[in-house]
Image (cartoon, rainbow, N blue to C red):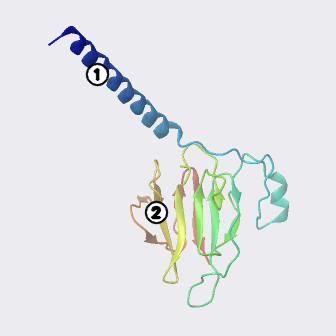
Amino acid sequence: MSELTLLILRVGFLVALWVFVFFVVYAVRSDLFGQRVRRMPAATKVPVAAPEAAAFMTSAQPRISVPASDEVAPADGTPLKIVITSGALEGHELALVGDAITIGRSPDSSLVIQDDYTSTHHARLEVRGGQWMLRDLDSTNGTTIAGSRITSPVPIPLNTPIVVGSMTFEVRR
Protein backbone atom coordinates (compact mmCIF):
# COMPACT_ATOMS: atom_id res chain seq x y z
CA MET A 1 0.00 0.00 0.00
CA SER A 2 1.18 3.47 -0.76
CA GLU A 3 1.58 6.18 1.85
CA LEU A 4 -1.19 8.21 0.21
CA THR A 5 -3.66 5.31 0.61
CA LEU A 6 -2.71 4.90 4.28
CA LEU A 7 -3.10 8.64 4.89
CA ILE A 8 -6.57 8.64 3.26
CA LEU A 9 -7.64 5.61 5.35
CA ARG A 10 -6.38 7.25 8.55
CA VAL A 11 -8.18 10.54 7.84
CA GLY A 12 -11.37 8.67 6.86
CA PHE A 13 -11.25 6.63 10.06
CA LEU A 14 -10.67 9.79 12.13
CA VAL A 15 -13.65 11.55 10.49
CA ALA A 16 -15.89 8.50 11.07
CA LEU A 17 -14.76 8.36 14.70
CA TRP A 18 -15.62 12.05 15.29
CA VAL A 19 -19.03 11.65 13.63
CA PHE A 20 -19.73 8.73 15.99
CA VAL A 21 -18.63 10.80 19.01
CA PHE A 22 -20.95 13.67 18.02
CA PHE A 23 -23.92 11.28 17.65
CA VAL A 24 -23.22 9.80 21.09
CA VAL A 25 -22.95 13.24 22.71
CA TYR A 26 -26.22 14.34 21.04
CA ALA A 27 -28.01 11.18 22.24
CA VAL A 28 -26.77 11.62 25.82
CA ARG A 29 -27.75 15.31 25.79
CA SER A 30 -31.27 14.45 24.55
CA ASP A 31 -31.69 11.80 27.25
CA LEU A 32 -30.50 14.08 30.04
CA PHE A 33 -32.13 17.36 29.03
CA GLY A 34 -34.95 16.30 26.70
CA GLN A 35 -35.78 17.78 23.34
CA ARG A 36 -35.70 21.51 22.83
CA VAL A 37 -39.02 23.13 23.67
CA ARG A 38 -40.34 26.48 22.49
CA ARG A 39 -40.44 29.11 25.20
CA MET A 40 -43.86 29.66 26.74
CA PRO A 41 -45.38 33.12 26.90
CA ALA A 42 -44.66 34.95 30.15
CA ALA A 43 -48.26 34.98 31.33
CA THR A 44 -50.64 32.10 30.76
CA LYS A 45 -54.20 31.79 31.97
CA VAL A 46 -55.15 28.65 33.81
CA PRO A 47 -58.78 27.55 33.99
CA VAL A 48 -59.16 26.20 37.50
CA ALA A 49 -62.03 25.05 39.69
CA ALA A 50 -61.76 27.90 42.20
CA PRO A 51 -61.31 31.47 40.82
CA GLU A 52 -59.37 32.60 43.90
CA ALA A 53 -56.72 29.94 43.17
CA ALA A 54 -55.89 31.60 39.84
CA ALA A 55 -54.33 34.54 41.70
CA PHE A 56 -51.58 32.22 42.96
CA MET A 57 -50.64 30.90 39.50
CA THR A 58 -47.35 31.92 37.91
CA SER A 59 -45.86 31.14 34.54
CA ALA A 60 -43.54 28.60 36.20
CA GLN A 61 -46.48 26.43 37.20
CA PRO A 62 -48.33 24.01 34.92
CA ARG A 63 -50.92 25.26 32.46
CA ILE A 64 -54.13 23.39 31.76
CA SER A 65 -56.10 23.84 28.57
CA VAL A 66 -58.49 21.29 27.21
CA PRO A 67 -60.20 21.45 23.82
CA ALA A 68 -63.94 22.01 24.12
CA SER A 69 -66.03 19.04 23.08
CA ASP A 70 -68.53 16.59 24.48
CA GLU A 71 -67.67 14.78 27.70
CA VAL A 72 -67.21 11.05 27.77
CA ALA A 73 -68.93 9.88 30.93
CA PRO A 74 -69.73 6.53 32.48
CA ALA A 75 -73.02 4.81 31.64
CA ASP A 76 -74.74 6.44 34.63
CA GLY A 77 -74.12 9.89 33.11
CA THR A 78 -71.80 11.17 35.86
CA PRO A 79 -69.09 13.36 34.29
CA LEU A 80 -65.47 12.43 35.01
CA LYS A 81 -62.78 14.85 36.17
CA ILE A 82 -59.07 14.86 36.89
CA VAL A 83 -58.22 15.81 40.48
CA ILE A 84 -54.58 16.75 41.01
CA THR A 85 -53.50 15.26 44.34
CA SER A 86 -49.85 16.39 44.44
CA GLY A 87 -47.63 18.74 42.52
CA ALA A 88 -47.80 22.43 41.63
CA LEU A 89 -51.59 22.40 41.07
CA GLU A 90 -52.54 20.20 44.02
CA GLY A 91 -56.27 20.32 44.74
CA HIS A 92 -57.32 21.60 41.32
CA GLU A 93 -59.89 19.81 39.19
CA LEU A 94 -60.21 19.52 35.42
CA ALA A 95 -63.24 18.08 33.63
CA LEU A 96 -62.40 15.32 31.16
CA VAL A 97 -63.71 16.79 27.92
CA GLY A 98 -62.70 16.35 24.32
CA ASP A 99 -61.28 13.30 22.59
CA ALA A 100 -57.73 13.51 23.93
CA ILE A 101 -55.67 15.30 26.57
CA THR A 102 -51.91 15.45 26.14
CA ILE A 103 -49.56 15.80 29.11
CA GLY A 104 -45.97 17.03 28.94
CA ARG A 105 -43.55 19.96 29.06
CA SER A 106 -44.34 21.11 25.54
CA PRO A 107 -46.38 24.31 25.33
CA ASP A 108 -48.74 22.61 22.86
CA SER A 109 -49.76 20.03 25.50
CA SER A 110 -53.21 20.25 27.08
CA LEU A 111 -51.69 19.85 30.57
CA VAL A 112 -48.25 21.47 30.74
CA ILE A 113 -46.05 20.25 33.60
CA GLN A 114 -42.77 22.11 33.87
CA ASP A 115 -40.43 19.90 35.86
CA ASP A 116 -37.29 17.89 35.27
CA TYR A 117 -39.10 14.54 35.45
CA THR A 118 -41.68 15.16 32.72
CA SER A 119 -40.86 14.53 29.06
CA THR A 120 -41.74 16.98 26.30
CA HIS A 121 -44.58 14.69 25.19
CA HIS A 122 -45.04 12.45 28.23
CA ALA A 123 -48.50 10.84 28.20
CA ARG A 124 -51.89 11.02 26.56
CA LEU A 125 -55.42 10.48 27.87
CA GLU A 126 -57.68 9.45 25.00
CA VAL A 127 -61.15 8.07 24.43
CA ARG A 128 -61.34 4.57 22.95
CA GLY A 129 -64.64 2.78 22.70
CA GLY A 130 -66.32 5.26 25.04
CA GLN A 131 -63.70 4.76 27.78
CA TRP A 132 -60.77 6.94 28.82
CA MET A 133 -57.41 5.24 28.26
CA LEU A 134 -53.93 6.33 29.40
CA ARG A 135 -50.95 5.89 27.08
CA ASP A 136 -47.30 6.65 27.86
CA LEU A 137 -45.60 8.35 24.90
CA ASP A 138 -42.22 6.64 25.39
CA SER A 139 -41.30 9.08 28.15
CA THR A 140 -37.92 8.86 29.85
CA ASN A 141 -39.25 8.45 33.41
CA GLY A 142 -42.44 6.61 32.51
CA THR A 143 -46.04 6.90 33.65
CA THR A 144 -47.40 4.86 36.55
CA ILE A 145 -50.88 3.82 37.63
CA ALA A 146 -51.10 2.63 41.26
CA GLY A 147 -47.32 2.28 41.33
CA SER A 148 -47.08 0.12 38.18
CA ARG A 149 -45.36 1.51 35.10
CA ILE A 150 -47.50 1.26 31.97
CA THR A 151 -46.13 0.16 28.61
CA SER A 152 -49.31 0.09 26.53
CA PRO A 153 -52.65 1.93 26.60
CA VAL A 154 -54.63 0.96 29.71
CA PRO A 155 -58.11 1.88 30.95
CA ILE A 156 -58.06 4.47 33.71
CA PRO A 157 -59.53 3.13 36.96
CA LEU A 158 -61.40 5.62 39.14
CA ASN A 159 -59.73 6.96 42.30
CA THR A 160 -56.35 5.40 41.45
CA PRO A 161 -53.15 7.49 41.65
CA ILE A 162 -51.54 8.26 38.28
CA VAL A 163 -48.02 9.72 38.36
CA VAL A 164 -46.63 11.81 35.50
CA GLY A 165 -43.32 13.47 36.35
CA SER A 166 -43.69 15.03 39.79
CA MET A 167 -47.48 15.40 39.52
CA THR A 168 -49.98 12.86 40.84
CA PHE A 169 -53.63 12.91 39.84
CA GLU A 170 -56.71 10.71 39.96
CA VAL A 171 -59.75 10.34 37.74
CA ARG A 172 -62.91 10.79 39.80
CA ARG A 173 -66.64 11.29 39.31
Residue 58's x, y, as percent?
78, 48
- Indicate whether 166 appears above or below 110: above
Which residue is disc 2 drawn over? 146
Name the residue beneath numbered marker 1. Answer: 13
Q: Amino acid at mark 2?
A: Ala
Give the SS element for disc 1: helix
Q: Mark 1 and mark 2 in contact (Cβ < 8 Å)?
A: no
Rendered residue at 70%/44% (across/down): 39
Q: Tag 2's secondary structure?
A: loop
Counting other residues with Cα less than 10 Å from the Cα at mark 2, is it few (<14), some (14-19), or many (20 or more)? Answer: few
Position of residue 51 measured from the top left corner of the image (x, y, whole percent): 84, 64
Question: What x and y, as percent, mark residue 9?
Answer: 25, 19
Residue sitting nearer the eye, 73 or 66: 66
Three-letter residue code for mark 1: Phe
Q: Nearer the viewer, mark 2 or mark 1?
A: 1
* Left or right: 5 in relation to 75: left
Q: Residue furthest top?
A: 3
> What residue is rendered at 44% in x and 34% in y?
28
Marks 2 and 1, how far apart in space? 51 Å
Percent x, y for residue 156? 49, 72
Q: Is residue 47 above or below residue 61?
A: below
Q: In this orientation, which residue lies closer to the viewer: 172 or 14? A: 14
Image quadrant in which you'd find residue 93: bottom right
Q: Nearer the viewer, residue 96 or 102?
A: 102
- Residue 115 or 166: which is nearer the viewer? 115
The mark nearer the N terminus, 2 or 1, is 1
Count residues near mark 1 (Cα–Cα under 10 Å), then give few for <14, some for 14-19, many for 20+.
few
Q: Write the residue at 46% across / 59% down.
A: 144
Q: Outermost residue, bottom direction?
A: 76
* Residue under the image location 49 percent in, 73 percent down: 157
